Amino acid sequence: MRRLIALFLFIFFSSILVISSSEKGMHWITQGRYARNDAWGADKYRFGDLYGVSYLSDFRIAKDTHLLPLPQKTDTVLRDYDLTILGDSYLYSSFQEHPAYFSRVKMLQFYRWSDSQQHLIFAKSNRKQVLLIECVERNMWDRMNLADARLRLDVQQEKSLPVDKSTKQILIDQLDRFDAGVKKAMYHPTLESNLDFVLFNLGFLGWIKERKADFTWKILGRTNPDVQVSRDGKFLYLEETLNAQKRGSSFRFVGKEDVDLMVHHLQEIESYYLSNGFDEVIFSLIPNPVAVLETEGKASNLAIQKIVEHPQLHVKMVDPSASLKQHALLNFYSSDSHWNLRGAQIWLNDFNQVLSKLP
């Protein structure tokens, strides 16, 4: 009997580990959990991703999980472009993967920064090709460079002829691939958070997490280390966007060297993709919510503005900062690290203005 129980536990926890280490496995279990509103469903994002980290009851605010509705169909619109997007959750959590949102776009391909596999992109029609590369401020310093872009997407390359290898070299290559697979499984970058989701992110456990979080916040003055409450108590922010020591912070000192390097990266990306089949390359840098909402009583580093206004920058750029600052409190969720649908529509309007002016 003990052996049977031990075998059952081994199979159970092995299955949990396999699911938590697999993108497909996590997609399967998260889709099922999020579809439920009962005790077995997941509330990690139902009330905002930052509530799902902090579990502060004051921010248990139902989030509109709908995507931005498609515009009414207009047959008179000339659709003479294909659009490829490399973007993050600011776009894929707000928009359907549908070309109707975008001015003059006939066909859409969307790829994510979070993808672990490289996608080969190539022209699918005789229409002009547009590439949009979008990234939120807190990630742009690490992601917005040609090497990282090519890790996610690249142009179609000619297949090289096979190279003859000795049996020894083939064996070495196989061992290298095996070692890489083992390391990837053992050091999966999100394994800890995935395990926490699979084992503990269940609706019936939410009240326990809230009681603990409220006690820690209201009595001890502390929150989850990844989340901070705004100075006015109305918003939750990612700690990395507030902490001036963090690379993605809106309050980190950004010097001329930082801005010069980012401008170089953007122009390098543009040159590469223009030389490999794209007719237009557009960039969009999305400001951290804390930089737009201005709740902290101190000036941000104006990082995106410095990049956009750099005298050597000659790429097409969509910076929604000014538009989002108009009635800013209406454009972001209180308990989520993203804009709401109103904010998404503001960005879309700005982007479509750029698309409409393309030659």
Image (tube, rainbow, N blue to C red):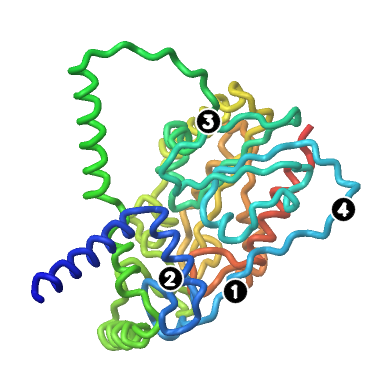
Determine the residue positioned at 47% across, 46% down. 113
Q: Are marks 4 and 1 in contact (CB under 8 Å)?
A: no
In terms of secondary structure, where does tag 3 sit? helix
Kind of residue at badge 4: Thr
- Residue at mark 2 to residue at mark 4: CA–CA distance: 38 Å
Q: Label 4's element?
A: loop
- Say whether marks 1 and 3 touch (CB < 8 Å): no
Q: Earlier in the sequence, mark 4 or mark 1?
A: 1
Q: Are marks 4 and 3 in contact (CB under 8 Å)?
A: no
Q: Are marks 2 and 4 in contact (CB under 8 Å)?
A: no
Q: Tell us which disc is closer to us: 1 or 3.
A: 1
Disc 3 target residue: 269
Q: Amino acid at mark 2?
A: Leu
Q: Which residue is mark 2?
A: 50
Q: Residue at (21%, 17%) from the top-left corner? A: 167
Task: Name the quadrant of the N terminus.
Answer: bottom left
Who is closer to the viewer here, 142 or 87? 87
Q: Is residue 112 visible?
A: yes
Instruction: Relative to 310, say whether 170 is above or below.
Output: above
Mark closest to the chain's N terminus, 4 or 3: 4
| Residue receiving disc 4 | 74
Q: From what the image shows, is residue 5 above or below residue 302? A: below
Mark 4, other Cα within 10 Å: few <14 / some 14–19 / many ≥20: few
Q: Is residue 140 left or right of residue 267?
A: left
The image quadrant of residue 240 is bottom left
Residue beneath label 1, please? Answer: 64
Q: Amino acid at mark 1?
A: Asp
Lower position in the chain sequence, tag 2 or tag 4: 2
Mark 1 vs mark 3, CA separation in Å: 35 Å
Q: Give the secondary structure at mark 1.
A: loop
x, y percentage for residue 27? 44, 59
